[in-house]
Amino acid sequence: MTRTLSTMLHQWTDKWLFKLRDAEQGEVMLNQRRVFIVPTRAGLTYGVMLIVLFLCSVNYDLSLGFALTFLLAGCAIIDMHLTFRNLAHLYLRPGRAAAVFAGEDAQFELHLGNRRKHDRYAIWLAFIVGDGAAIEQVTDIAADSSTSVTLSTPTHERGWLTAPRIRLQTRFPLGLLRAWSYWQPAMRVLVYPHPEENAPPLPLIEGENADGRGHAGHDDFAGIRAYQAGDSIRHLAWRQIARTDHGPLVTKQFEGGASSELAIDYAKLPSVMDVELKLARMTRWVLAAEARGLPYAFRLGSTHFPPDAGPAHQAACLQALALYERAA
């Protein structure tokens, strides 16, 4: 109960003090109310030095001491303005986030726009994960231009992964002060199940050859097509190849081939297997079938895809595996 109240108080303080927001759609501008600034350790030391200089100047009535003290104080004030200006009124926009397999790092692309007449230097960005920040990326942005930064975060399980909150900060130009702001982009990445290591071979149905083509239907010639990796040499159309000098290889195509009957079916896996292991095995089989160019049917619960091959078919199957029994 005490922890719950403490957590709620901490979240309320963050939202009230640091203006933390939920996921923000589209482009976001860091206005003045969203940028915070505090002295760094060097800045605190600098402030103590100014106090000592001022006291010494008062005590010994040193005119040059007063001049030096006020000069250094003026430099600190200018540094405060430049540090704040380096981050304020920056435009932020989410980019692309490609799907990955569990265990890989998810890459989130971010766009930063500078619509002011001054350059911006040494802006550091990092995801806030756990109790701290991940590895920071630094970038400079010229006047009236934009740049892109890619931040990564590890993935551990399948499904949708929401981008963590981002902290932007800068200590430019003197490092006496640190300005920072927070941004929660409305971004997420799809994480596929990690493919099973040393998975068994593809579940070819009984009566198929190793190249994925069955014995039935070989007498029903249906035409020729371009050669694909894995095609049997016995099926090459040598007569058509001989007619063209240095022409592309072509293969005889027969009706009734069994390669299109390959089915990756969740229900046919052993019932004693763990759900995640089943999904990992099916992921490996999808990748293996695509690598061999074999059309395959896909069945997972109520999801059923007819035999097909290609990037779109693979993406649809992997997405079904990633979101199986989980809310999108």
Image (spheres, grey):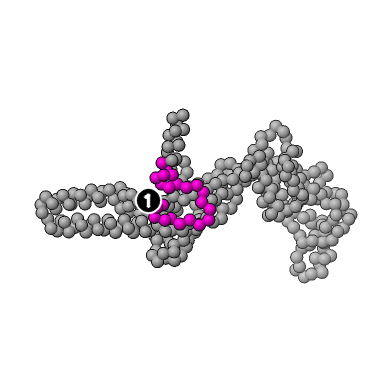
Q: Where on the picture, by quarter, is residue 236?
A: bottom right
Q: Position of residue 202 (x, y in %)?
A: 73, 44
Residue at image location 61% in from the left, 44% down from the top:
159
Q: 85 or 46: which is nearer to us?
A: 85
| Numbered range of the magenta stretch | 13-34
Q: 239 or 187: which is nearer to us?
A: 187
Image position of 217 (left or right of 325): right
Q: 195 or 36: which is nearer to us?
A: 36
Image position of 158 (left or right of 1): right
Q: Position of residue 326 (x, y in %)?
A: 63, 40
Image position of 185 (left or right of 119): right
Residue type at numbered disc 1: Phe
User: Which residue does the numbered mark 1 point to in the structure image?
Assistant: 36
Q: Position of residue 120 (x, y in %)?
A: 40, 61
Q: In the current view of this chain or complex, which residue is farthest to the bottom? A: 245
Up-down: is 123 above or below 102? below
